[in-house]
Image (cartoon, rainbow, N blue to C red):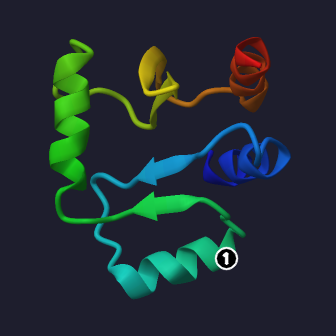
Amino acid sequence: MLPYLSDLQKKNRKKIFVIGVLVKSKLDRKGLIKFMKKYHLNFFISNHSSSQALSDKFAKDLNLSSNYKIPLTIVFYKGKYLIHIVGATPIEMLQDIIDQIK
């Protein structure tokens, strides 16, 4: 799904800011940079050691089970929560959400 998010960011670059937070991943900084280059990812991705804690906090706030499916997509508008989607999401669905916000 990450390459599709990259396309979404590129297409809507003045309207959205995509952030990826890696969880359940062992990629170090060097590995993350290689991964981003390989898939031409053009948005911020965090693989910080606190990423799992952040993900767990979102899951708790959204009343998800501790073993929720990834990816977890959360959409905010002007700092306010709008919607979340658990599991893989068709890029057309995300673009539709963005278009509705516009």
Identify residue for label 1.
Answer: 38
Amino acid type at image mark 1: Lys
Query: Residue 82: x and y, percent?
Result: 49, 14
Q: Left or right: 45 with respect to 91? A: left
The foreground one among 1 and 49 is 49
Q: Quadrant of the C terminus?
A: top right
Query: Residue 21: x and y, percent?
Result: 39, 51
Q: Which of the 4 quarters of the picture holds residue 11?
A: top right
Residue depicted at x 40% and y 36%: 70
Above or below: residue 35 compared with residue 58: below
- Furthest-bottom residue in this view: 30
Above or below: residue 67 compared with residue 37: above
- Furthest-front residue in this view: 78
Residue depicted at x 69% and y 25%: 94
- How many numbered circles are shown? 1
Query: Residue 34: x and y, percent?
Result: 55, 83
Q: Which of the 4 quarters of the picture holds residue 50?
A: bottom left
Above or below: residue 79 compared with residue 10: above
Residue depicted at x 72% and y 69%: 40
- Furthest-right residue in this view: 11
Q: Can the viewer see residue 89 in this picture? A: yes
Residue depicted at x 76% and y 26%: 95
Q: Residues within 10 Å of mark 1 (few under 14, many from 20)?
A: few
SS at mark 1 in the image: helix
Above or below: residue 22 compared with residue 76: below
Q: Can the viewer see residue 65 in this picture? A: no
The foreground one among 77 and 87 is 77
Q: Quadrant of the N terminus?
A: top right
